[in-house]
Image (spheres, grey):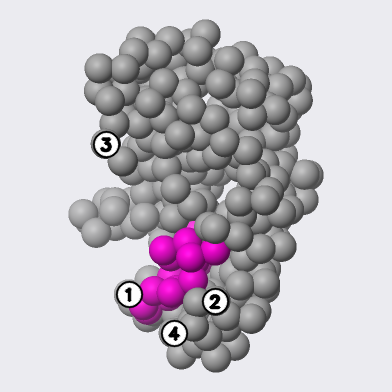
Amino acid sequence: MAVDKQMRVGKAAIIEGLRTLSIGRGSKLIVHCSLKSFGHVDGGAATVIDALMDVVTDGGTLMMPSFNHGVPYDEGGLFDVLATPTNSGAVANAFWQRPGVYRSMNPTHSFACWGKDAQRYTENHQRVDALGLGSPLELLYRDGGHALLLGVGYNRNTFHHVVETLTGAPCLTGRGERYPARSADGVVRETHTWGWRDGTCPINDPARYADRMAPYEQRATIGASQAICFALADCYTVVSAALGEGLDGYPPCAQCPTRPRRCEWTV
C-alpha cells in the first residue's frame, strides 16, 4: 500500500493511536516500526519513541530489535555494543542510543530495552541462545508481553523465530556461530549467536500464518501507518501449530529438509 507522504502526524496523534490498541501504563512491548509508514512525523524517530515511552511509562518495558544481521563482519569489522548501528530501521536505531536504554550483547541479533525490566531482559543475552530460552524476547513472552507492528507486516515479526527455536526447528542452531564482539567495557570477546538456515522457511519467512492471527490482533491507523498489536502467547499458539502441522501445502518442520548453514563462523 502506498504511503501518503503528505500526511502529517505528531506525538499526540501517535499516543491516541497507541491507546486505542489497549497499550498503556505498564505494557510490555516488542516494537517493529517503519518511520516512513506514518507519512511525515513531526520530530521524526524521536517523536515516535517519546510517544511510546509516555504511554508505556517506566513501569512497563519497551523492546526493539537492534540487529545488524552480520553486516559488520561482511565488511571486515565487528559488533560494538556501544557503537554499531542497527539496520532494523530509523526508530530502532535512534532507540538503542537513548539514555537509559540497555542493549544486549549478541554479535548479530542484539535487542535494545527501556523500562522496568530492561536490564533483566538484556544482561545475559551472550550466555543463552540468540532467540531461545532466556533471550530478551523469550523473557518478554514469558512475562505476558505483546508485539506492536507499526507500518510493517508479520514478515517482520521476530517472535516467530523464538517459536522456531523453542519448538526445536531443525533449520536453526541457537548458538551455532561465534564472532568477536566488543562489549561495553571495551574488551573484544568471542560471542555466540544462532546459526541461520541454509534456505528459507516457507511458513515463517513470508509469514503465511498471518491470516490465522486475525482473531487475536487489534488494529488501528496512526497517521498513514497501519498498526497491529497482539499477545506473544497467542502468536506462539498460531505459529507453533503451523510449524507442527504444516500450512498451505508446505510441510511441518519435522519434514522440511532445510538445515543450518555452514560458514567461517560456524562452531
Q: Where is mark 3, residue-wise? A: 2
Q: Is residue 23 visible?
A: yes
Q: Where is mark 2, residue-wise? A: 247
Residue 203 highlighted magenta (yes or no): yes
Q: Where is mark 1, residue-wise? A: 264
Q: Where is mark 4, residue-wise? A: 258
Viewer-nearest residue: 134 or 209: 209
- How far apart are labels 1 and 4 at the CA level? 19 Å
Residues at marks 4 and 3 touching, judged by CB atoms closer than 8 Å: no
Q: Which residues are magenta?
A: 191-209
- How far apart are labels 4 and 3 at the CA level? 35 Å
- How far apart are labels 2 and 4 at the CA level? 16 Å
Residue 46: where, in percent of width, then height?
Answer: 42, 17
SS class, disc 4? loop
Q: Earlier in the sequence, mark 4 or mark 3?
A: 3
Q: Is residue 175 above or below residue 20?
A: below
